[in-house]
Image (spheres, rainbow, N blue to C red):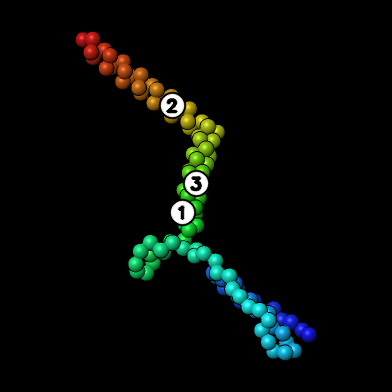
Amino acid sequence: MARILGLDLGTNSIGWALIDDVQNKIIGMGSRIFPMGVENLGEGEGREMSKNATRTGARGVRRQFFRRRLRKKILLKVKFSSNIFYNFIYINLSFIYKLFITTFTARRT
């Protein structure tokens, strides 16, 4: 007596049947339906959203923040290594000092 197990694998369900090959009889069958993988947001086409879409969106935002931080770190590393950053600070501080002196002396007179 040979038995054959047939499986039907779908996107939202699994179906099965057990068949006796000698007698050509179905011994058992059944199916298992999984819950929907999307949420319906209203009527019309394109109004369904995956339940995983919010996680995917949040992951994308985290990646953007990480990459932006990484670009800033790399830029600061380049500035420090090429001495551009120190020259920039010195120029800005000297300009602010001159501006402060001229404003302070203009107020006293």
Q: Given contact means CB atoms under 8 Å apart, are the residues at marks 1 and 2 in contact?
A: no
Q: Which residue is mark 3?
A: 62
Regarding residue 98, the answer to whether it shows in the image is yes
User: Of discs 3 and 1, which sits in the foreground?
Assistant: 1
User: Based on the displayed image, in which of its 4 quarters is residue 92 positioned?
Assistant: top left
Q: Residue furthest left?
A: 109
**Residue 35 coordinates in the image, percent (x, y):** 52, 64
Residue shown at 54%/66% (left/top)? 34
Regarding residue 60, the answer to whether it shows in the image is no
**Residue 10 coordinates in the image, percent (x, y):** 57, 73
Q: Residue furthest right?
A: 1
Q: Residues within 10 Å of mark 3 (few under 14, many from 20)?
A: few
Q: The residue under label 2 is which amino acid type?
A: Ile
Q: Element under label 3? A: helix
Q: Nearer the viewer, residue 105 or 35?
A: 35
Q: Which residue is mark 2?
A: 89
Q: Given contact means CB atoms under 8 Å apart, are the residues at marks 3 and 1 in contact?
A: no
**Residue 37 coordinates in the image, percent (x, y):** 50, 63
Residue shown at 48%/44% (left/top)? 65
Q: Which residue is mark 1?
A: 54
**Residue 99 coordinates in the image, percent (x, y):** 31, 20
